[in-house]
Amino acid sequence: MTYADLTLEIDAGVAVVTLNRPEQRNAFSGPMAASLAAAYRACDADDAVRAVVLTGAGSAFCVGADLTAGTATFERREEADFSADPIAFPAWEVRKPVIAAINGHAVGIGLTLAMQCDIRLVAREAKLGFAHVRRGVLPDAHSHWTVPRAIGHARTAELFLTGRLLDGEEAAAIGLATRALPGGEVRDAALAMAADVAANCAPLSVALSKRLLWESRGLTRDEVGARETAYHHVVMGRADALEGVMSFLERRPPRWSLAVPRDWPDDL
């Protein structure tokens, strides 16, 4: 499949999704939105994909919406299916870890789409910000749900309501990212993390844990416990639970046999 404003490469269990408008610093476009959702769906459906890295071509991750349409950029939309989240299949729906390698500036939707990922590594020198209120709109892509989960209400309010920029070091310090690195190291670090997951982590176990992490915010303690128990019933006594123990005892790499989506429970 070909993708507009985006590339998808898969190697050794790792899919690399690259926002690909480097001349425009990967400014977000309608075709890019459709391509990103399609690429995520492809990664979710492919048993050969164990982890996904999302990054940007060139020096930026994504500098936000493409503003070249001028006053028409944020014109009123009357379509019944209009959504403030343009990603029809967001990263949290992918049943594999999605790691954002924020290799450069991530502003507006460039940052809100990164917040849909499971893990974020960021360039120290990158500028990041939810600049939407400085453009007459407001943060999008479910960010009023994703960002408070990561950094809490008070910090989210400051960033959303001021639209100020921060650098990668501050982003990591407050929890928007897990690690700040020199820009030239971000992609390699994300790829190394993804390769480690692909080689050493049981794919069905990872998928179930990811699903529960994203679900847990809206659940009570007892509801989370019940789902943990139910998900354990999915994996315990099966091939990967046996292999995980034996590969450890025999000091060898694991050979996982369960796969996503092939072995995904029908009732989830």
Image (cartoon, grey):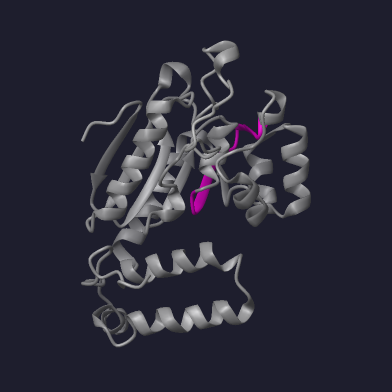
Q: Quadrant of residue 124?
A: top right
Residue 241: x, y in percent? Answer: 31, 82
207 vs 178, left or right, is left
In depth, the one of 78 and 42 nearer the eye is 78
Residue 141: x, y in percent? Answer: 55, 41
Residue 88 visible in image: yes
Residue 94: x, y in percent? Answer: 38, 54
Residue at the (26%, 72%) spot, across then down: 254
Q: Residue furthest bottom?
A: 237
Residue 57 visible in image: no
How many discs mark residues in the rendered view?
Answer: 0
Q: Quadrant of residue 218?
A: bottom right
- Find out whether residue 119 is within the magenta segment: yes
Residue at the (42%, 25%) spot, across then down: 58
Q: Please report the bounds of the magenta region as a residue range.
A: 117-131
In the rendered view, would you say 6 is above or below 208?
Answer: above
Residue at the (26%, 54%) spot, across then down: 45
In the rendered view, would you say 67 is above or below 106?
Answer: above
In the rendered view, would you say 238 is above or below 257?
Answer: below
- Image quarter where the C terminus lies is bottom left
